[in-house]
Structure formats: C-alpha cells, structure tokens
Image (cartoon, helix red, strand yellow):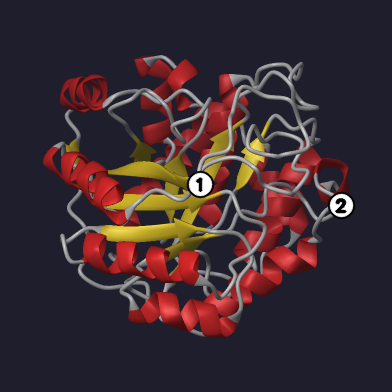
C-alpha cells in the first residue's frame, strides 16, 4: 500500500478497519515508516483563548452555554498571557500551539483582530500555530494566512449520517464548507473526529471515508476519545475500548499516509503501554500541558514532564516545528 489515494470506497476502508488487529498494526506501522520518521512525535499545546458561553449544542462539549457544567464563561485572553503560555510550552519542547475559542463562527470584529495579533506573535516565536475558532469565510481564512497561521482545525466529529444526533446548530455541510474555505489559502487543514459519541463502526468508517476522499487529505487528523463531562447529554457514555482507538488510528494512517495522526483528547486515561500501541499504529502527535487540562477547562491532559518521561522510555523524540505549510506531500520511499 504505497501510494496516496483520494478515491477510497467505504467497502475498502471497512476491510482495512476489520483486518486482524496485529496485522493491521503491522501494516499501519509499515506505511508510517514509509512516509514519516517513526522516531519523531510532535508535541502540541492547546490554549483556550476564549472559554465557555458557546451557543452551539454539541452534545459532548463542556463549553456549550446550553448545558450546566463546571465551566464558567471567560473573556478572550490578552495577548501577553497567550504569548507567555506559548513561551513556556516552547521551552518544554512543544512545536505547535493551537488556540481554541468557544465561538460558533469567526466575526469581523475587535476580538478577531486580537486573535490575528496573537497568531503573528506566536508564529514569530518559531512555533506552528493552529486555530480552532468555529466557522469562517474565505476572507477570514486569508487574513489568518496573512498573520502567519500554519493550520486551521475544524473537526468533522463523526459521520454525516450521525452528525445531527450530536449537533443540531450547524450542518455537516457547514463543516465541509469551512474546510473548503481554508483550502483557498496556504493554511493547512486539521480535521478528525471523536470516538465514544454513541456512533457505530459504520459511522467511524463513513467519517474516515469523507476525510480520505478530500483532495488533498487533511495534513492533520486528530483522533479524539470522548471525555465524559458532567452536565452534557453524553456524560454517561461508556469508555471507548483501547483497541477501537488503535484500529481508528491504524486505519487513518493507512488511508491517509502523509497526514499527521494526532492522539488528542482522552489520552490522559491511556496507560503508557496503550499509548505505545497507538504510536506503533501510526499516531505521531500528542497534546501536552503544564496545567493537566486540555482546554484549561475540564478535559484532562498529561503534563510535559510525564510525557517527556514516556517519550524517553520509548526512545522517541520531539519533532521540531515545520518552517512552512507543506501542501505537496513528499512520498518518501515510493
């Protein structure tokens, strides 16, 4: 399996997903070595620059204003605070900083101007900067590009078929339109999904099918594990079995070989052994923190020191930041 394809059929993806587990991991590891340095893991830091008060009804999210959670709405952080957090992260080996704002969409106002300034300053530190700000227009994407933005995150979350079960305040087409707007720029795309929303295996395959048929593939594909938040409709969802996580990572790696596959939210409950299987299956990025929180709110996140210890134990190293978006994937060894 040595080429890059954009014409995957759901039947083919299902066959990959259902491959006997150890064989699947072996195949994914082989593809991973063909397109990536298997010793390198990119360590990322997620900063919630504007927390809570979101009008969306995403059933998993602690930041929705529609649910009674422990998250209290906070105003947009000032630039100095964000730069200081990014500086600390850089000193710990982080090469990518993602700024998240609990907005439905980007609006052309003073807050967006402040975000653009944050992007410029953190980019000037030599870090990759990713933003996740909700829906945005092509013009807004171009302004982010001009500020130096490296990547824009806009997850599909789940399949088109299951999407309205989880979110009713926007459509699947809205998600895809935002990705297409980003593609009008040189900003890379970060888009993946969440496991544990009550979706079926067919929903997972359908979501991967949508991602794998985007041309080009998202440069970054986060695989998130639901962190159940008290007060949200999904607070009582059962935990996702680790082997489901490994299968998703391995399948994503095989069908989108050049993408970074990010072991994202939910990693805190995985042991070092379980994380090692995820890395073997093709995950080459993690989120780390200094406050044990993914979004400085409720989602647990391992800290820098614990992650450094794990990477040392596994003989892995932190990947430095890329100097520019790479829209043309290099087929190493093909």
Q: Residue at x 74, y 32 (%)?
A: 197
The residue beneath circle 2 is 161
Is 182 rendered above or below residue 167? below
Q: Residue at x 50, y 77 (%)?
A: 141
Q: Is 304 situated left or right of 12 in this image? A: left
Q: Residue at x 65, y 43 (%)?
A: 53
Q: In the rendering, which numbered label is found on residue 92?
A: none
State the image coordinates of residue 134 (x, y, percent, origin top left). Answer: 61, 60
State the image coordinates of residue 69 (x, y, percent, origin top left). Answer: 67, 24
Q: Earlier in the sequence, mark 1 or mark 2?
A: 2
The residue beneath circle 1 is 222
State the image coordinates of residue 324 (x, y, percent, origin top left). Answer: 26, 73
Asked whether 178 or 232 is in front, the reply is: 232
Q: Is 216 situated left or right of 155 in this image? A: left
Mark 1 packing: few (<14 Cα in 10 Å), some, or many (20+)? many
Asked whether 92 or 33 is in front, the reply is: 92
- Residue farthest along the left direction in this orientation: 91
Q: Is residue 183 visible?
A: no
Q: Is 251 situated left or right of 114 in this image? A: right
Is 233 rendered above or below residue 262? above
Mark 2 packing: few (<14 Cα in 10 Å), some, or many (20+)? few
Q: Is residue 99 visible?
A: yes
Is 293 rendered above or below residue 261? above
State the image coordinates of residue 190 (x, y, percent, origin top left). Answer: 49, 59
Q: Residue at x 72, y 43 (%)?
A: 204
Is 8 rendered above or below residue 251? below
Determine the secondary structure under disc 1.
Answer: strand
């Amino acid at each position: 399996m040595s080429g890059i394809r954009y014409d995957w059929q759901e039947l083919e993806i299902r066959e990959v997903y259902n491959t006997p587990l150890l064989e699947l991991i072996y195949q994914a590891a082989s593809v991973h070595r063909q397109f990536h340095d298997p010793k390198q893991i990119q360590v990322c830091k997620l900063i919630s620059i504007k927390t809570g008060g979101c009008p969306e009804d995403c059933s998993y999210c602690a930041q929705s204003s529609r649910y009674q959670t422990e998250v209290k709405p906070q105003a947009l952080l000032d630039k100095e605070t964000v730069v200081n957090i990014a500086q600390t992260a850089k000193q710990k080996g982080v090469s990518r900083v993602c700024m998240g704002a609990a907005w439905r969409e980007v609006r052309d106002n003073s807050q967006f101007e402040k975000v653009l300034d944050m992007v410029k300053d953190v980019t000037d530190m030599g870090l990759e900067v990713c933003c996740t700000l909700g829906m945005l227009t092509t013009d807004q994407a171009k302004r982010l590009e001009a500020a130096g933005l490296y990547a824009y995150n806009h997850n599909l979350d789940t399949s088109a078929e299951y999407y309205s079960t989880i979110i009713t305040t926007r459509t699947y087409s809205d998600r895809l339109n935002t990705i297409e707007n980003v593609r009008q720029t040189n900003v890379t795309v970060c888009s993946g999904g969440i496991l544990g929303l009550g979706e079926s295996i067919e929903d997972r395959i359908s979501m991967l099918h949508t991602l794998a048929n985007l041309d080009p593939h998202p440069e970054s594909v986060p695989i998130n594990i639901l962190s159940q938040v008290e007060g949200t409709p999904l607070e009582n969802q059962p935990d996702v079995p680790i082997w489901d996580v490994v299968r998703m990572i391995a399948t994503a790696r095989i069908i989108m070989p050049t993408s970074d596959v990010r072991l994202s939210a939910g990693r805190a409950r995985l042991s070092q052994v379980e994380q090692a299987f995820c890395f073997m299956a093709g995950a080459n990025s993690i989120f780390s923190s200094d406050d044990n929180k993914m979004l400085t709110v409720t989602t647990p996140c391992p800290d820098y020191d614990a992650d450094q210890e794990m990477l040392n134990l596994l003989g892995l190293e932190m990947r430095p930041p890329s100097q520019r978006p790479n829209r043309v994937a290099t087929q190493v060894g093909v």
